[in-house]
């Protein structure tokens, strides 16, 4: 048994050192499902290597076991009469030989790595492993999905998410350790609300009898403190008392117990002195401030859940489906495209069966190797995308309005790539199709941008066009402002992932093989602020989109100017 423990302790140390000493190379895996799929095949390869390693180790241990059993029988007999046993010269010689030579061979066998392939394979692959930022990013994505779609911790932990059917083989649940880890991620961000929710879920699963290496004392420690930070002194005190029933000598809990009791007594006294009317007024002011602080975020999340503004029946009756040939365009006279009105103001049109499965797969294939975090429009500062030739080389960085420093943009959780028409006939054909259907010149448009959204992937409310306070937004391109947006949906999304327009209440659901189109500018050239839009977090599924931003230059004789600002 001691030999076996020695063997495994050596290899456990090697294994842990490989798993923890990740390379500094970082690919932001959590921001793209497309890149995360590669990790599954990497893990499968490692499992195969690990199984080979186990077989080799089992063979080695079998040899050690046979040696131990043989010596066990020998020493049991020899120690009954040591002098008599050694009185035989052959036994004496063999004892010298065993201790001088054979035990050395056993030592070499125990320390020998029987499967160099596994350790070397793991060493090579570990440079491509996700790092701490990926794990934290995926955790934050779960918390974001929880808030946006109002999911309770039990629903997420049990894996019963909307869009997941019971017969799916890959439904997954969260263990106590998983819930505890989510709570720690929230705690590291001083997000005590989510810390409490996930520590409480971990505690619930422990109370239900789930076996775990996470100790209940540790969970209660985090839980009591996060509750205290939210001003719930009585509940913080309850959790602390329970902690002390499990570990009566817990020093921090003993100190917190006295402190919480002191603070609770102080709060009770203050509450008595404060009138009910003043407290009520204070709560009303607090609620008013909350409503004023994030009105758009509230509308955005409502639309993502399928709630919010509804179009009146009278307006709905004005929306139609039709076959469209763009004024008898030669290519579409015989085979017109299917067009559907999604919204009236701003006018949002969906084109059905506008891109084939083969074309979509080719676009994904071309884009996947070059997917990168993109520099995008900051809803706070208004900084727009850098030019396409820069985007492919930079991660998403924006100016933090508080510190003034460049930081990674967290409000867009996706990766994107840019495809030029000359790179492949499929890209050229897609560009031509957009021009034929819209009647707009795409020669001055930006390259086709392909985006793949990651875990909880989203893009918060933003404009596609440059505002008046951004006169140099597209100066480097020299093609004017973004007059229109064309957006392909290249995958179905079982739950979440809609494109929503918070200002007007429009919600467009992803549907594979379709595209939506809208104008960002009025004919007068003024920006249409009702086109402010967002991509809702992907709750379940893998979202692929590609878009074409069409610019003003080249459209002078294709779209008539209006005399009024909002024509």
Image: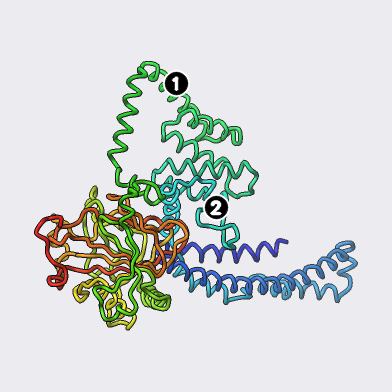
Which secondary structure lies at badge 1? Answer: helix
Q: Position of residue 58 (x, y in %)?
A: 70, 71
Q: Residue at x 23, y 55 (%)?
A: 399
Q: In the shown orientation, is residue 278 left or right of residue 214?
A: left
Q: Residue at x 60, y 71 (%)?
A: 50
Count of marks overlaid on the render: 2
Give x and y (percent) for residue 201: 54, 44
Image quadrant in which you'd find residue 32: bottom left
* In the image, farthest residue toward the left: 563
Is residue 119 placed above or below 82 in the rendered structure? below
The residue pinned by badge 1 equals 265
Q: Are marks 2 and 1 in contact (CB under 8 Å)?
A: no
- Nearer-the-camera pick, 67 or 163: 163
The image shows residue 134 at horizontal and vertical percentages of 42, 60
Q: Which residue is mark 2?
A: 160
SS of the residue under disc 2 = loop
Residue lying at 58% horizontally and 42% vertically, measured from the top left: 204
Q: Is residue 252 left or right of residue 432?
A: right
Disc marking residue 129: none
Q: CA distance from mark 2 to mark 1?
A: 43 Å
Decide if residue 420 is in sight here. Answer: no
Is 31 located above or below residue 96 in the figure? Answer: above
**In this view of the protein, can residue 37 be seen by the observer?**
yes
Q: Residue at x 27, y 80 (%)?
A: 421
């Amino acid at each position: 048994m001691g030999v076996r423990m020695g063997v495994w302790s050596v290899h456990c140390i090697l294994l842990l050192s490989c798993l923890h000493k990740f390379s500094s190379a970082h690919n932001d895996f959590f921001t793209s499902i497309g890149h995360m799929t590669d990790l599954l095949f990497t893990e499968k390869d490692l499992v195969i290597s690990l199984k080979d390693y186990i077989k080799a180790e089992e063979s080695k241990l079998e040899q050690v076991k046979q040696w131990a059993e043989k010596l066990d029988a020998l020493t049991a007999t020899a120690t009954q009469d040591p002098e008599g046993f050694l009185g035989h010269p052959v036994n004496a010689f063999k004892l010298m030989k065993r201790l001088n030579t054979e035990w050395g061979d056993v030592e070499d066998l125990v320390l020998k790595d029987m499967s160099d392939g596994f350790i070397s394979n793991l060493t090579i692959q570990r440079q491509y492993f996700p790092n701490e930022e990926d794990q934290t990013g995926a955790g934050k994505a779960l918390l974001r999905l929880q808030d946006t779609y109002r999911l309770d911790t039990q629903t997420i932990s049990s894996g019963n998410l909307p869009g997941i059917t019971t017969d799916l083989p890959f439904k997954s649940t969260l263990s106590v350790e998983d819930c505890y880890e989510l709570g720690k991620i929230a705690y590291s961000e001083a997000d005590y609300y989510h810390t409490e929710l996930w520590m409480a879920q971990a505690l619930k699963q422990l109370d239900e009898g789930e076996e775990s290496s996470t100790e209940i004392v540790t969970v209660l420690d985090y839980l009591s403190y996060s509750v205290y930070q939210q001003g719930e002194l009585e509940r913080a005190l309850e959790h602390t008392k329970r902690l002390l029933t499990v570990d009566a000598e817990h020093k921090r809990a003993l100190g917190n117990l006295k402190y919480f009791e002191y603070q609770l007594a102080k709060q009770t006294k203050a509450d008595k002195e404060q009138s009910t009317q003043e407290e009520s007024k204070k709560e009303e002011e607090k609620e008013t401030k909350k409503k004023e602080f994030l009105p758009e975020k509230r509308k955005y999340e409502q639309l993502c859940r399928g709630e919010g503004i509804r179009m009146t029946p009278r307006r709905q009756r004005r929306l139609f489906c039709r076959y469209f040939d763009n004024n008898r365009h030669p290519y579409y006279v015989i085979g017109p495209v299917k067009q559907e009105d999604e919204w009236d103001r701003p006018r949002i049109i969906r084109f059905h069966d506008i891109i084939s499965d083969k074309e979509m797969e080719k676009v994904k294939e071309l884009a996947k190797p070059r997917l990168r975090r993109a520099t995008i429009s900051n809803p706070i500062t208004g900084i727009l995308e850098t030019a396409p030739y820069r985007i492919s080389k930079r991660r998403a960085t924006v100016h933090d309005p508080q510190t003034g420093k460049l930081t990674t943009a967290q409000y867009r959780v996706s990766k994107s790539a840019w495809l030029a028409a000359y790179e492949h006939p499929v890209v050229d054909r897609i560009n031509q199709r957009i021009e034929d259907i819209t009647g707009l010149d795409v020669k001055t448009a930006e390259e086709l941008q392909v985006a793949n959204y990651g875990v909880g992937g989203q893009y918060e409310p933003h404009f596609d066009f440059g505002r008046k306070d951004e006169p140099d937004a597209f100066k480097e391109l020299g093609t004017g402002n973004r007059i229109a947006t064309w957006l392909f949906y290249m995958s179905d999304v079982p739950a979440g992932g809609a494109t929503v327009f918070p200002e007007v209440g429009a919600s467009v659901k992803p549907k594979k093989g379709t595209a939506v189109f809208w104008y960002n500018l009025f004919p007068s050239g003024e920006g249409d602020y009702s086109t402010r839009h967002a991509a809702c977090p992907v709750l379940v599924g893998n979202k692929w989109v590609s878009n074409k931003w069409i610019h003003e230059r080249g459209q002078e004789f294709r779209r008539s100017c209006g005399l009024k600002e909002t024509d």
